[in-house]
Amino acid sequence: MPAAKNRPNGPTLALHKAATGIDGLDEITEGGLPRGRPTLVCGASGCGKTMLAAEFLIRGATQFDEPGVFMMFEETADELSANMASLGFDLPKLQRQKKIALDYVRVERSEIEETGEYDLEGLFIRLGHAIAAIGAKRVVLDTVEALFAGVPNHAILRAELRRLFRWLKDKGVTAVVTGERGENSLTRYGLEQYVADCVILLDHRIADQVSTRRLRIVKYRGSSHGTNEYPFVIGSHGLSVMPITSLRLEHQVTKERVSTGIDGLDEMLGGLGPYRGSSVLVSGAPGTGKSTIAAKFADAACGRGERALLFAYEESQGQLIRNMRSVGVELLRWVQEGLLQIHATRPTLQGLEQHLLRMYDLVREFRPAVVVVDPISNLSLNTSEANGKAMLMRLIDFLKTQRTTAILTSQTIETAIPLADSDVGVSSLMDSWLLLSNVAYNGERTRTLQVLKSRGMAHSNRVREFVFSDKGVELVDVYLSGDRVLTGTARMAQAAQEMAASELRNQDHQLRLRGLQHRRAAVDAQIAALNAVEDERREEVELSIARERFASEGLAARTRAIAGANRKPREKARSKRSEP
Amino acid sequence: MSSMRSPASAKAGAERTRAEWQLRLYVAGNTARSAAALENLKTLCETHLAGRYSIEVVDLLLNPQLAAGDQILAVPTLVRKMPEPMRKIIGDLSSQERVLVGLDLRPVPRE
């Protein structure tokens, strides 16, 4: 797409351009409107021509230091000022600062009688005077076609218009001329014949009772431009054109992870939760707990001291706070602390573009770390599939560039494979996809959660059961029994059964351990007895040895004693006896 | 107020401010067309409004800021300031009947 190639104010362009400052328009036009030339903005009544023209002028005066003249033929200056004030533009102030000149040209056919020849020099003089007075670089003529009603001689008028546009070019002012859409032509009076440099067509279409404004550049002489139809909205800060292709996939990524606020879920998502700035889709049938997971996420963010923004399209703020309190998620305190903003609206209130613009505005203003949209499916309900996806893509891209973690919930229809087509389409945009489903078995329904995908992390492939209580939300392991996943009561029964079984086993183990212990004790006793016997025996042996020794020593002693007593008398006898 | 007092107004409207018919002719410079318009106007006034009118000629090239006041687009433009309501006639006033219709002026019956 051409719009993606160049950025506004990008590389030097052959044609000089005057930036409009309007969100997105400069991207489509690759820099703005042709400088020093008139641009025709045409469209049916109420499609935003005047707004575009006025914003072009005001932004020129305030942002680009290019004063401008607004010559109006339909509204009075006061009406225009009031209209622009509602968008936050202070025209009277700009007028006082000589940055903007307003000139209301009243054309009243009934007051005008025509006799003979004339020209529109009066208009030129007025315009020229206004341009000179403030040194204008930009001019708006809104809607110059009103002259056709006021000036009887169209031949003169056409000649004068041709002269006017030539004159504007000669003056070197960048002009925006608005024109009413005609039946078979771009404008009712064929203004496009005179303004041939750039033509922008605005359109206001109603599809399924929701109105969408669209903008298309029909022609841009000497410049490439986005050729698509681009939706645009008139928001509280003026016009915003949303070029689909202008955003490129080049946002900064981070390794930082954020907790979902549910321990079990973090564990399933690689143990740490999703990456900061990633987008998480939570899809599931009604009543599976999407909103709770989303609210829990916001709660966790606020708990970390970060800001969270919650868009609720099904419940009001009060209802949401009450309902979440019932599962132990207290959101009110965060709202009071200013960490959480809840915006509850009906999806049908506005078109999708309008909703998205509001989201953009709020995200830019509030700069939240986490954005929750609950549910996204209600939003895209209003619009055709392709359109919805494109819009969603822009939202996700936008949030990624803001490094905001997005939690989007999506309602699906309960079927065997509980996925909506829209989910599949949208899921490719998402980094993580959680699927909640109801399992009905054995007369009860339980909630399960699984991670279908989660980019860039090892995530659990298991189905976990998801339990609400007034203490909060927790994930419990399900039991696999045969080929079936057990949840709810069946899980509890199974758990009880396993518990009982393990109790028995436990007792058995203890018994066996005790037996072993006893045997060991018996062996020890035996060993002790044997030892005792042996000790006894040894003692006996030692005793007998001692006794024998004692006996022999006694004998020897007695022998010596006897020998000593008989020494003198028996000397001879002993020597006799000793020398045989 | 006016830039260029025409001889006609000086002549005809001795008490210009109180004149019954107060006419103002806007022109842009001294072109043939503005001269013709002034000439045509003077003739008409002398014929039908003798002594009851004043003419003020405003050259927008000299006083461009005056164009917005009477919502002037085309030149020449004749504006009937008095009697009210205001009427405008654009062009060189070459068709006397149409000027009379435009001024809502009943012609003086010819004798």
Image (cartoon, rainbow, N blue to C red):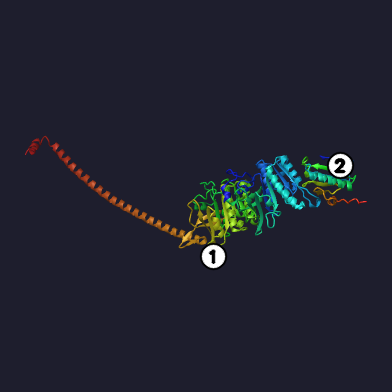
Q: Is residue A156 visible?
A: yes
Residue A6 screen position, x and y as percent: 57, 46
Q: Which residue is mark 2?
A: B9
Q: Furthest residue to the front?
A: B32
Task: Report the label total.
Answer: 2
Q: Secondary structure at mark 2?
A: helix
In percent of width and height, residue A120 lies at 75, 47
Residue A260 spot, x, y in % from top left: 54, 51
Label number found at residue A163: none
Give left or right: position of A99 versus A542. Answer: right
Q: What is the C-alpha distance between the residues marked 1 and 2?
A: 105 Å
Residue A428 as seen in the image, left or right of residue B33 = left
Instruction: Decide: few, some or many residues near mark 2? Use Cα within 10 Å; few <14, some 14-19, many ≥20.
Output: many
Of residues A562 and B86, the one nearer the viewer is: B86
Instruction: State the residue lying farthest toward the right.
Output: B111
Q: Chain of mark 1?
A: A
Q: Amino acid at mark 2?
A: Ser
Q: Position of residue B69 (x, y in %)?
A: 79, 44
Quadrant in the rendering for residue A566: top left
Q: Of the residues shown, which amino acid type is indicated by label 1?
A: Gly
> Which sits in the foreground, B18 or A51?
B18
Question: What chain letter is assigned to the residue under label 2?
Answer: B
In the picture of the structure, the residue carrying the numbered disc 1 is: A443
Vertical placement of residue A304 versus A386, above or below: above
Q: Is residue A327 visible?
A: no
